Image: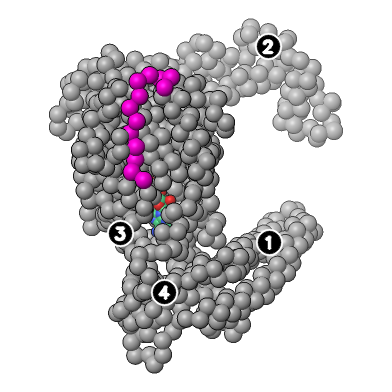
Amino acid sequence: MNRELEQKRVDSVIKILVKEINRLEDETGRRKSEVIQTRKNFWDEVKVNTDTFDDYLETIISLRQEAQALSVIQTTHKHASKRLSTLTKMQEIPYFGRIDFLEDGLPATEQIYIGISSLTDASGEDFLIYDWRAPISSVYYDYQPGPAKYTTPGGVVEGVLEKKWQYIIRGGVLQSMFDTSITIGDEILQQVLGKVTDKKMHNIVATIQQEQNRIIRHDQGRLLIVQGAAGSGKTSVALQRIAYLLYKYRDRMNADQIILFSPNSMFSSYVSNVLPELGEENMQQVTFQDYLYNRLSDEFEVESPFEQLEYVLTSHGAPFYSSRLASIRFKASIQFFDAILSYRQSLELEGMQFKDITFRGKPIISSQQIIDRFYSHDTQLRFHNRLEKLKDWILEQVKEKTRYEWAQAWVQEEIELLSNEEYYKAQITLAEKRGYKKDAVADYDMEPEALARLIVQQKLKPLRRRIRKLQFINYKEIYTQLFLDRAKISRWLEGEIPEEWDAICLGTIELVDDAKLSYEDATPFLLLKELIQGFHTNSSIKHIVVDEAQDYSPFQFEFLKRLFPAAKMTVLGDFNQAIFAHSSDKNNFNLLTNLYGPDQAELITINKSYRSTKPIVEFTKRLVPNGEQIIPFERDGELPVLRKINTYDELHSSIALKIEELRNHGYQSIAVICKSAEESSRAYEALSHIDGMKLLKSSSFDFEQGIVIVPSYLSKGIEFDAVIIYDASENVYGDESLRKVFYTVCTRAMHCLELYSIGTPTPFLQRALDEGFIQV
Ligand SMILES: Nc1ncnc2c1ncn2[C@@H]1O[C@H](COP(=O)(O)OP(=O)(O)OP(=O)(O)O)[C@@H](O)[C@H]1O
């Protein structure tokens, strides 16, 4: 193919793009002034008249019409600006691929150019560029030259893919192009993966691989589960999939209706570029921990998953360590979820606990009176309605019991203490109640009894508010009842009572009584609370994507399902990286397929790893038992190196030298990865003199590029040009339960991996050492 001709085509497409960009700039400018003008004139167009009912109706109708007109202009403006930003990106890289496709039954081969969005010629009929998400574009990702087909809403289209080209166009200049049927391997992918990292993750639109494309375009059932090796592109694919769904369902779904659950806030910042690069708005991003915190932090000091993990990683052998682990595992299980459902059912008949209602420290209604009242209601009534009736009764009782409160001495004392301002405010309130107009407030002579009653009302306000919010329910006590004794739990729990139950009970009650909630208790507590007060579901969300899904317990998945009843779910994870203590012993997502029933679920496994060089993948796959399945992408590099060291001083000076060397080599992101936050702070103390060195903490919000020290669990999902394992000794990574942590940290390296060990290295390295996949 003639390169000059191709550049000419690029030029002519860019000309059309520029024309369209100019037109849109005009349009968005115009629309913007229209919006401003309409907002300004809003109240001129509407005549507010509420004298008669008809006038009132007319006012409402004209208000609606104006609001609608404004909303139409705003939507058009938003669409035009979005298109403008996409086309501006395409001016730089109009397209990245081309297929020559001969459709069965048609006389001529069509050339399909593929970019981040479609573009037609002036007539609007001929596509100069096809959107990468269009049905025909899937041929580009799915086939090598030969017979090929793709699915459209109208059916399957078959034909022959005659040629496939990859282009590198930057700033409108064609830099290179490859005929993929001639070149060996994936040249562009080689180039992309060989580069040093950037602060943020990038889209992979030009080089999506066939098995990844299947995940991106998957559209059956409510649940898609992806089990993928470290570096197989799960996060990248998840984001491309969101872009695909936004395109396919553009009439029905917008970015606000998709939520991505990320492992931590730093990760959210790390991936925040991908969708905008593809011309799409970002989805909502949350962490499960933030959600729990939002819902529970008023009542409790809630432990974060990182604090939990820090305990698990650093407290081996501490008293109650093993019962805490047993507790974490039990509270993550479906059995416990179901037990809570049964427990909630049983509360229909007995067991509800309430707080005493007190006013100024004096009891008005005792918890026992509330219990008696609650269980005197007809049990046929729905639970929630019973609570509503109870609430009304309590409010009524409060009113009754405080009827003569105004005559009490404390009220007079309060009145005497009123400031002038407060006194005046009270006068306004009462005067208005008596029908005085604002300017006649001074004419009103305040009656002492009315003022006293007002004072009582104001004092009662917070109490009434709490009652209306059902805050008289004693959730803490209801939750801890689950942990009172063996006889109790066995009523609700199917199957065996967990090991170390008595210790689990003691630990749980002690914490909750102290207004603390461990991470493992947070979701179960919230579930019980929601089941009692009525679930705060969110039906506007249409899709949720859960990344690093191995870190979620089966319990949490059940919870998410209830929280988002209208959503489909995409779940991506890697059981080799399951580092939380609640992770299932079973190394797969099989249990999860039951979430919506097996016919609603598909599980796809991807084993090819793109992040690291071949020598690094060959090494890391030898760290985990089922690693043979992992296939490296062909990219050269050095074998990982193990350096045995005797003292910490020697360790720190070697690391400092290594960092210098790596920096000189041109690597931009270098991570010293430690097991825990505790080890990280020690390392930081000794290495902070290194120019630009930063310590990443669980509270960090932005993903910092450069040279960082980071604890294992915060490095999840993220990658670095070079990784230094701070101390890979048996001392640190001795226990079998840490194998997956060790695998996770080693798989963060893209180009270079160095391991240091003070004394005997971890036994996890044995196989790689025996087989020569690590240099000593
Ligand atoms: N098709 C592809 N084209 C270009 N780069 C890719 C492709 N697939 C994956 N990558 C790159 O490989 C690296 C790893 O991808 P990603 O972080 O999405 O993997 P992951 O499966 O989520 O990894 P982990 O589970 O280890 O966190 C990223 O740099 C990503 O850009």
**The CB of the residue at mark 2 lies under 8 Å from ligand 1:** no
In this image, 501 relative to 757: left or right? Answer: left
Residue 388 versus residue 89: which sits nearer the camera? 89
State yes or no: residue 648 in magenta.
yes
**Where is residue 512 drawn, in percent x and y?**
37, 19
Report crowding for label 4: few under 14, some 14 to 19, many 20 or more residues within 10 A (C-alpha). Answer: some
Earlier sequence position, callout 1 versus callout 2: 1
Q: Residue at x 41, y 74 (%)?
A: 179
Structural crowding at the residue carrying mark 3, measured as other residues with C-alpha within 10 Å and reported as few (<14), some (14–19) or many (≥20): some
Residue that label 4 marks: 179
114 magenta-colored: no
Return the residue at label 1. Answer: 70
Please identify the residue farthest to the left as the structure is shown: 495
Q: Amino acid at mark 1?
A: Leu
Give the amino acid type for the residue marked by disc 2 in the picture: Glu
Marks 4 and 1 close (CB-CB < 8 Å): no
Q: Are marks 2 and 4 in contact (CB under 8 Å)?
A: no
Mark 4 vs 3, N-terminal side: 4
Q: Which residue is mark 2?
A: 414
Question: Where is residue 375, by image quadrant?
Answer: top left
